[in-house]
Image: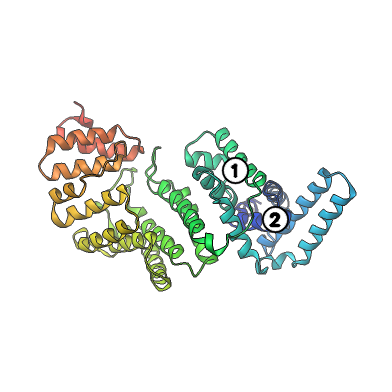
């Protein structure tokens, strides 16, 4: 029954983080929890085609995984005391409710929060946080994460092993941090989700402009965070930003996969359902507290999404929002994006002036913005050289093809060859 197998795969992808979170709390061992959930998945593939999908797939997953974990613990631990301890843990888990009631267990949401903050502990490198979040919360396989983050699978497997070992050996607490640490730690959590989405939204390499799997996982994680932390303004700000950005994805490439710049996009192809969701989420973020970086970026995305035609974009408002964002996060990338908005309001020369002091050699968007503004300002030869520098920078193939086309139009030579 292929349908049952497909439903099993979907159920485990949707409930992987919840199951790992519950078992990690009960067992105190991330590896054991992860192995148990994987064994439960294998059991579902074996039995669901015969017996049918259970009424509560989430409850079935957790109960079956708990049983597998206790069986394994009993096999591996020598001595009656350890076996008794495992049996007590199993009994305690069974008493939390019947399988169909697991979704109502009062601490499930807290368990998920604990796991999210554990994956994003500051003792781990940023790369390890991203990988561990995708593995334990998102349920991606090691191979999927390796492909998504463009590293060899053995390297990714070693990275995940080291991260989990560090959590175990450093005795990193499996908990939501205390109030005085929450701000810093939440910032790290949001940064990981944002990084996953931005890599999916505009890949730094590869044959496609968008990595849909990464965008989908980041959106799912952002939705979960908003559900788990409903009173946090920046959590809703991040979700709004992702929704409003994702709404434009259908128009960002044409039928052949070529890049379509924002001014040339068919705005009727934008997903208005996602725009409405993003707008509602943004309103909720405004109600919850003062603006943070993600909410301000969501406000900028909302201005773009509100314009029915490119010439209807409220660029002066976007400049104001970038001024606010620059005060919150004074980074070269923010200044780069602000310069684009300034050029739309005041012309390319003012845009170039706004770029003075911004140095991001090797960062393709910086070279592209400079090239476009130089051409618009009539400094075509300088713009051509800047386009050539952009082509030397890492980037995905659709963007590279667009750069070659633009360069070819300026030089009259295919691909802008010298």
Q: Pick the residue in front: 129 or 262.
A: 129
Q: Residue at x 63, y 61 (%)?
A: 111
Question: Would you say residue 414 is visible in this rendering?
Answer: yes
Q: Residues within 10 Å of mark 2 (few under 14, many from 20)?
A: many
Badge 2 element: helix
Residue 231, x across and y down, in percent: 49, 70
Residue wearing tag 2: 23
In the rendered view of the protein, which quadrant contains the C terminus?
top left
Residue 56, x across and y down, in percent: 67, 64
Q: Residue at x 11, y 39 (%)?
A: 379
Residue 158, x across and y down, in percent: 59, 36
- Residue furthest to the right: 80
Q: Nearer the viewer, mark 2 or mark 1?
A: 1
User: Is 410 on the left or on the right of 286, as rendered?
Assistant: left
Q: How many marks?
A: 2
Q: Which mark is residue 153?
A: none
- Residue furthest to the left: 378
Instruction: Check the image and report above or below for 40 versus 286.
Output: above
Badge 1 element: helix
Question: Would you say residue 224 is visible in this rendering?
Answer: no
- Per the model, the C-alpha gap separating discs 2 and 1 is 18 Å
Q: Which mark is residue 163?
A: 1
Sooner in the amino-acid sequence: mark 2 or mark 1: 2
């Amino acid at each position: 029954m292929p349908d049952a197998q497909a439903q099993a795969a979907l159920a485990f992808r949707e409930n992987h983080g919840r199951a790992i979170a519950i078992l990690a709390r009960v067992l105190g061992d991330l590896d054991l929890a992860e192995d148990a959930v994987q064994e439960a998945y294998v059991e579902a593939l074996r039995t669901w085609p015969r017996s049918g999908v259970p009424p509560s797939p989430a409850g079935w997953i957790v109960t079956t995984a708990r049983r597998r974990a206790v069986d394994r613990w009993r096999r591996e631990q020598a001595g009656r005391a350890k076996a008794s301890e495992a049996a007590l843990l199993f009994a305690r888990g069974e008493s939390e409710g019947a399988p169909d009631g697991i979704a109502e267990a009062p601490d499930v949401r807290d368990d998920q929060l604990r796991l999210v903050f554990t994956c994003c502990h500051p003792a781990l490198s940023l790369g390890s946080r991203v990988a561990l979040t995708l593995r334990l919360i998102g349920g991606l396989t090691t191979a999927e994460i390796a492909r998504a983050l463009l590293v060899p699978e053995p390297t990714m497997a070693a990275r995940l092993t080291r991260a989990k070992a560090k959590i175990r050996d450093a005795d990193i607490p499996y908990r939501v941090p205390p109030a005085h640490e929450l701000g810093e730690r939440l910032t790290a959590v949001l940064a990981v989700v944002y990084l996953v989405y931005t890599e999916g939204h505009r890949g730094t390499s590869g044959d496609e402009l968008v990595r849909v799997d990464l965008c989908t996982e980041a959106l799912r994680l952002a939705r979960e965070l908003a559900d788990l932390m409903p009173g946090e303004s920046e959590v809703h700000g991040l979700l709004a930003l992702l929704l409003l950005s994702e709404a434009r994805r259908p128009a960002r490439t044409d039928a052949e996969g070529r890049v379509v710049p924002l001014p040339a996009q068919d705005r009727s192809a934008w997903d208005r359902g996602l725009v409405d969701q993003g707008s509602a989420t943004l309103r909720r973020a405004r109600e919850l507290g003062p603006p943070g970086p993600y909410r301000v970026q969501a406000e900028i995305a909302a201005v773009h999404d509100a314009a029915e035609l490119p010439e209807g974009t409220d660029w002066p408002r976007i400049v104001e929002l970038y001024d606010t964002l620059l005060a919150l996060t004074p980074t070269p990338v923010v200044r780069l994006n602000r310069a684009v908005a300034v050029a739309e309001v005041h012309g390319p020369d003012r845009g170039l002036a706004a770029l003075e002091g911004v140095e991001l050699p090797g960062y393709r968007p910086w070279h592209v913005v400079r090239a476009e503004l130089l051409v618009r300002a009539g400094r075509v030869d300088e713009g051509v050289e800047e386009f050539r520098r952009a082509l030397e920078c890492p980037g995905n193939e659709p963007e590279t093809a667009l750069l070659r086309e633009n360069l070819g139009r300026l030089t009259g030579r295919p691909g802008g060859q010298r």
